[in-house]
Image: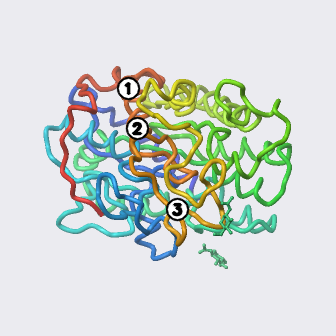
Amino acid sequence: MSQLSILFTSFIILLNSFRPVAGGCFTSIFSFGDSFTDTGNLKASGTSNPIINFPYGETYFHHPTGRCSDGRLIVDFIGMHIYISEAACLPLLPPYLLGPDEHRDFRKGVNFAVVGATALEISFFVDKGISLPVTNYSLGSQLEWFKLLLPSLCSSDSECKNVLGNALFLMGEIGGNDYFNVLGDGRSLEETKTFVPLVVNAITRTLLVPGIVPFGCIPANLVSFRSSNSEDYDQETGCIKWLNEFAVYHNLLLIKELDRLRKMHPHANIIYADCYQAAMPIFQSPEKYGFQNSPLLACCGGGGLYNYNSSCLCGELGSTVCIEPSRYVSWDGLHFTEAAYKIIAAGLLQGKYTNPPFTKTCALFETIENLEFSRNTY
Ligand SMILES: *[C@@H]1O[C@H](CO)[C@@H](O)[C@H](O)[C@H]1NC(C)=O
Ligand SMILES: *[C@@H]1O[C@H](CO)[C@@H](O)[C@H](O)[C@H]1NC(C)=O
């Protein structure tokens, strides 16, 4: 942990000394997180998981890339926005585990996120007898990777100022796996809540920090935590109230901690991205956004009320995929479709759900719809 605190301290120092220049726009992204952000690290690690199978990736890439969606993720849309503002046609954010090559210049940014990653160290779960089914790469491992990579990104002060000074550090979404590993182990909500301060502590201290999404509207959770008590459900959306309240609880603590960090480091640029509020309108009025099916129904899955079946996951034999993913909010019962991610990302980029607003930190703004982009993929 002490090595990590040193690294965190150096983050803050870097942020303090190198404010974004050139109209406040970012020129590269370094991102950390879990399946909401992984652009191919779990796949590159060689771990077997249904997300490496078709139909993952069918919409945009036309093949599985290791992203947990039919197409692009929020990080891809943010990357497109940032890179376009540099007037350069750069490839999408490369996963760290593939290593740099002539197509992957890590100085333009790199993605450390891994599907299944936890904010807390693996030992925390091992000590409690809780197993981590998907990956052992925690946020700590991802920060270690960044530390290892740093010397190859820049050597002199002025070079580092260029590479890191205008970089956006995207920290999350992360924390969901921490909670669901614990809840999935049959532990109580009360016990799980005691971990929230630890998780929040592990996440904070960097630039763009997304909050977690409405847990209670995720098909897999609607199946796992289904209830015969109609009072457990929100009348308007059909989402599970206590899970959404739990997500809000996490986000409130995160906002509070970010406020504290801003006061401690007034020159650091810390942005909170409210993914919960950015996603909620989709569940309240799906038709307004072109989602003709229930937003609680997964496009790809193994059947059941929400088309999520843990014994027959999307990408596994026997699962089926919808014809038009763009009409669905949930891709595989756990993650969103590209269409939903695009709406959430647009809300964040327009500044409505970011604090301080994105538009204030970057003078140049292009709407996502206008972006054409290189489809170099990993
Ligand atoms: C994580 O590490 C443990 C202990 O070394 C190992 O038994 C387990 O298989 C690993 N899990 C994954 C998903 O790699
Ligand atoms: C879930 O998948 C299993 C295995 O394919 C199958 O036996 C079961 O009937 C499915 N459940 C639902 C609700 O579709």
| Residue 58 location (% of width, % of height) | 35, 58
* Amino acid tagged 2: Leu
Residue 132, relative to residue 279: is it above or below?
Answer: below
Height in image: 359 above or below 48?
above
- Horizontally, residue 14 falls left or right of residue 190, namely left
Question: Which quadrant is the N terminus positioned in?
Answer: bottom right
Decide: marks 2, 1 in contact (CB < 8 A)? no
Q: Which of the marked residues, 1 or 3, is nearer the chain's N terminus?
A: 3
* Residue occupied by mark 1: 358
Mark 2 highlights which residue? 15
The image quadrant that residue 264 belongs to is: top right
| Quadrant of the displayed image that contains ligand 2 | bottom right
Label 3: which residue? 314
Q: Quadrant of the C terminus?
A: bottom left
The mark that comes first in sequence, 2 or 3, is 2
Q: Which mark is residue 1?
A: none
Residue found at x 62% / y 36%: 214
Q: Is residue 321 above or below residue 203?
A: below
In the rendered image, residue 171, in percent from the top left (x then y), is placed at 49, 45
The Cα atoms of the two marked residues, 1 and 3, are separated by: 34 Å
Residues at marks 1 and 3 touching, judged by CB atoms closer than 8 Å: no
In the image, 331 versus 132, the foreground residue is 331
**To which quarter of the image does residue 137 belong?**
bottom right
Secondary structure beneath dot 1 equals helix
- Relative placement, left or right, of 110 versus 123 is left
Q: In the depicted view, which residue is nearer to us: 74 or 155?
A: 74
